[in-house]
Amino acid sequence: MNIRVRHILQFVLAFAAIGVVHADEGMWTFDNPPTAAVQQKYNFTITPAWLEHLRLASVRLNDGGSGSFVSPDGLLLTNHHVALGQLQKASTPEHNYVADGFYARTRAEEMKTTDLEINVLMSTEDVTAAVSAAGRTAKSPKETLDAREAEIARIEKESLDRTGLRSDVVSLYQGAQYWLYRYKKYTDVRIVFAPEQQMAFFGGDPDNFTYPRYDIDFAIFRVYENGSPIHSEHFLKWNPRGASENELVFVAGNPGSTDRNDTVAELQTERDVDLPTSLAVLERRLKALHEYASRGAEQAREANELIFELENSVKAYTGELQGLRDPSVMSKKVADEDALRQKVESRDDWKATYGSAWADVSKAEAARRKLYDAQRFTQIRGSELAGLGLRIVQYVQETHKPDAERLPGFHEAQLPSLRMSLLSPAPIYVPLEEALLADALQESLEKRGPDHPFIKATLEGRTPQDAARVLLGHTKLTDPAVRKRLLDGGTAAIEQSTDPLIVLGRKLAPMAKTMHDTMEREVTGIETAAHEKLGQARFAVYGTSVYPDATFTLRLSYGSIRGYPMNGTLAPCKTTFAGLYDRSASFDNKPPFNLTPRFAVARNKIDWAIPLDFVTTNDIIGGNSGSPVVNRNAELVGLIFDGNIESLAGRYVYDETKNRAVAVHSAAILEALRVVYDAGPLADELAPPTR
Amino acid sequence: MNIRVRHILQFVLAFAAIGVVHADEGMWTFDNPPTAAVQQKYNFTITPAWLEHLRLASVRLNDGGSGSFVSPDGLLLTNHHVALGQLQKASTPEHNYVADGFYARTRAEEMKTTDLEINVLMSTEDVTAAVSAAGRTAKSPKETLDAREAEIARIEKESLDRTGLRSDVVSLYQGAQYWLYRYKKYTDVRIVFAPEQQMAFFGGDPDNFTYPRYDIDFAIFRVYENGSPIHSEHFLKWNPRGASENELVFVAGNPGSTDRNDTVAELQTERDVDLPTSLAVLERRLKALHEYASRGAEQAREANELIFELENSVKAYTGELQGLRDPSVMSKKVADEDALRQKVESRDDWKATYGSAWADVSKAEAARRKLYDAQRFTQIRGSELAGLGLRIVQYVQETHKPDAERLPGFHEAQLPSLRMSLLSPAPIYVPLEEALLADALQESLEKRGPDHPFIKATLEGRTPQDAARVLLGHTKLTDPAVRKRLLDGGTAAIEQSTDPLIVLGRKLAPMAKTMHDTMEREVTGIETAAHEKLGQARFAVYGTSVYPDATFTLRLSYGSIRGYPMNGTLAPCKTTFAGLYDRSASFDNKPPFNLTPRFAVARNKIDWAIPLDFVTTNDIIGGNSGSPVVNRNAELVGLIFDGNIESLAGRYVYDETKNRAVAVHSAAILEALRVVYDAGPLADELAPPTR
């Protein structure tokens, strides 16, 4: 499955710490590792040197996943489904690396990616004092937010200028803390190996987010700098035996987002508005995608990645919605909230400082519900290409303002990564974009009616199909050089452009700004302030042994390899290659349970008893895809690629009895490389044979 | 798992037809087969000849299961877990046929069972008119019941005398119909083959009642008459290829009991009183059993079968209780009941005839709840041996009365099977019986207090441990010859006996009679009358396209081989031998997932892609264990041995989306016999090689 991070939301989300930590719960920052808990429960001492090594061997991928260095020469291990976007972009009608896999037998054959950025976390610094001070004299939540955004932009810019490192200020513990994270950035990343998607994603959508599982969901990149592979001692040594049942293991990765500290009012909006709407949108878009894919083999190839991603989201959201609709989950959240509120109200000073937060959030949530459709359905959606026009217009408009006054995402320190994204040379399939844009515009029309300014500006009296055809048929933004000229041409270039997407972008930019300001005034500004109070209240009540909600930044989780009770019986802590052949034969080798020819042929050569996948109690979520699983010696024993179906409620609450992370076993990758893929030299580079 | 019939209850249960039949639902009598539904849904015509052949090839085993003839020379196929009791009885401290399996390479080696009775249904006859007429002039429900029981005893006796066939009157459709079932009876049944219990019950209690599954749960007997194997053309031809996905299949077997037509008031008693109490009793007894088994290898061997049976019950009851606690199940039952009541109340004649039934049942259920503990905990429980004393005393007392006045179970036509059971030479493990009796007595003491007459009579001031030791240590009833002398010695022998169990039996007999009469007056008499009205009301409202609740008599179910949605993904319609090896390796070959040496050795010889188990939509329940699965040609394609966890709520409601019967595949049995067990000749006798 795809446990990559969700698309980053337009509006800043704030996160906060959960009250009391039990069991193997928690996605811990490297600044506040769960040292005491691990010492007590597993008798293992987390040392600063151990932590530093693991941190420097761990990476974040801008495609929304995690990974790790696994050789002194820059080999990088992640999931196939994290690499999928790059494999798709590298493919052509002639070479389908997604379907057929890829193996570079020499360094010369290693294949450049187009727009993959790798981040290694170099340092972190608490900047709470400076950010908090910035809003102190403001007269409204919105003014506070603006002032803090300005201060954050200043800190990021100053850090970038001084260190040359990517510098992001991260809001942790629901805004009770702000931290400056500095990353070393790599952009020359080459594809070394990928299995066929069918084997990486064996079982397809049905098996996605479930276990027992039989997927070999890995891919290998090599990271270059100045034209040569990087060299570093900070890589994870490959342990070809993996880890045993009940053994302590750690996961280092970048969980995208959790809602563990959301108030009940927020969860109710999620349950009643956000998730049902998102599911309806996704189902609709999937229908359009399948229609497009049915037109022919090339169309199917083009649509493949997005179908994968959207089906993945449908399954994840469905599980989350079931979680929120489970009375036991919601009553636990209500009880947790009541407990904190009672503590806060038991002391006058706490009550005065934090007591209003819940009511404030409820008020903001009422506004969010009211604004929900207006905000969601008056944006360009469905088509990446169609969205480029507005983003280029905004880029030019915003970068002409002082950094402090810009919209989020356009601050000085954010520009390098933004430009990389806007100028990506990745192929664009215009007919696919057109089908999706037409569907999204039709949906907006149905939701907002023909007289809405967004609809008028976009359709200009045409049908959604016609509008999509004209907008995408006549634009020149498919050419990265055209985009670059517009980005660098300043206001004049934007004003003079007759490109239909730029013309549309000019009309939509003020609407987007108005909507952003409205949301900030009525929802996000209020909630940011209230969340900060809630985060501070938790520190006051429960002390510092808490972890923040996930923020797609580096976290450490601990746990052990353990099966769990499942559907009346036990799920084992691991599966084997025999299970892969069983499941395939059980479905008569029909898709999505078919074996590729390579795996079918290997049936009598492969050691069927070798572990394939395994489960751990580690607390992870989307964004952890590709995270290394390491043992006490920080050796690589597995590769996170999914959570079980029971883990989907983990967005809201962790349950050690059945919440499991699913990983590929280190031995399975070596066996597949050597026996199935004739890639012994790569296996040897990963796990040098002992002499 | 063990889907054998539950122990027959002391009080007559009445059964009735469900309102509207959907999908592949139903356990149909051979008199009223689902001809129209099968024709319409599967385009197959059930003919009388086809039905007769299947009926005559199907058998019921008095150990609580089903089976079928699978050769012209009397080979009988059933489940290992149905044969388990006989394998246990045939075993000794030197030869453990349960653990090690058994194969008779020659007919001379075929091993006699001690007390197995096989019934083949020869004819059925509607006797409703006679039975109903019997109670017509009675003045109370109890009098009606007594009069009908007398008439039933008369019919059975008359039929037995006239035909020599075992003759049972069965109450169907909640007593709206009574049928006389005549059986040909075989008691010379010999063991031909059994695999090791570990392979038949691979996965043990965890995998019991679940799927996907990897059990080879079969055993083979041969039925003899007059010292020679029987010969018959009515056997099922073995189809070595089995059946395909979505193929129509039938199951002929003896489902034990269902509660599909229970009123909501009855289900509430089951949910709130009966199942929770039964689970507490079972857990307690299992604790005592495990304590006993821990004393040594021989004790473990002795306790094995009962542990299996009790764990099986715990799992089944737990699933049933979950079903009743599932709001969607109970609200469906409420809706069904409301629908029928509204129909009944819509016509004055129906209302007058049937309208009081629900209130009557509710009143009886209130009495049942009040009497529940008094009835349940004032019986000799736990020990088969200890119960023999009372049963022998009752046998002598009752058989001296006119047939019509006897307690249920002691009527003339029931005596042959009763005597076979009372005189069984099967080994009795006294220390095991003692441990269980002590535990049950302790429980009764806790529940009813030291001053209750039952407790006083049983303990006589001793501790439960001391009482159990003395009662079982001094009795001579372990010897079948002693029992026979008492049974045949008449009142004098009983009165003069100083055997402690007979002495106790004399004291308990009047108490048991009083309790029986109380229950009949306050509960069963009222409910039998009310159920009859409900059954008739269903016929009036819904017509005759309904099936009766299960009664451990021969039924036909239809369905197809189909996977189902499970725990977020799909369960395949079949598993393979590869899955067996996967599951074993996944648990590091630890019990209950360990392979026996024979199967471990066969790893490289067996064809791993051969189907092992499969699932069908057929509607079955405990008692169907060992039932044949046949195709349109009435060829054997599989062997029912379990239901999935989702089927446990099937006691109350059938759900085609996920209720599945689990069967061993016909090909798996042949492969195991030939490749694993070196039993090629037996495989050839079952499925003669085509020339």
Image (spheres, coloured by chain):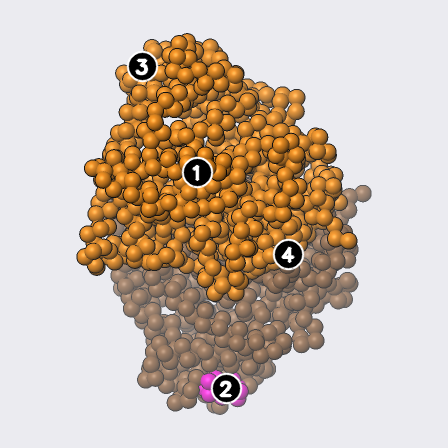
Chain colours: A orange, B brown
Query: Dot 3 corresponds to which residue?
Result: A456
Q: In this figure, which residue is indicated by the disc labeled 4? A: B584
**Dot 2, crowdedness within 10 Å: few (<14), some or many (≥20)?**
some
Direction from residue A105 to residue B333 in the image, left or right: left
* Location of mark 2 (residue): B469
Residue B553 or B678: which is nearer the viewer? B678
| Disc 1 + disc 2, Cβ < 8 Å | no
Q: Main secondary structure of the magenta part?
A: helix
Q: For the point 65% across and 60% down, which residue is it?
A: B589
Q: Residue type at mark 1?
A: Ser
Dividing the image into 4 quarters, which one contains the C terminus of chain B?
top right
Q: Position of residue A410 (x, y in %)?
A: 39, 28
Give the residues drawn in magenta, as a range.
B465-475
Q: Which residue occupies 47% across, 48% down? A: A555
Q: Is residue B201 visible?
A: no
Q: Nearer the viewer, mark 3 or mark 1?
A: 1
- In this view, the residue in front, B291 or A55, is A55
For marks 3 and 1, give the CA distance: 43 Å
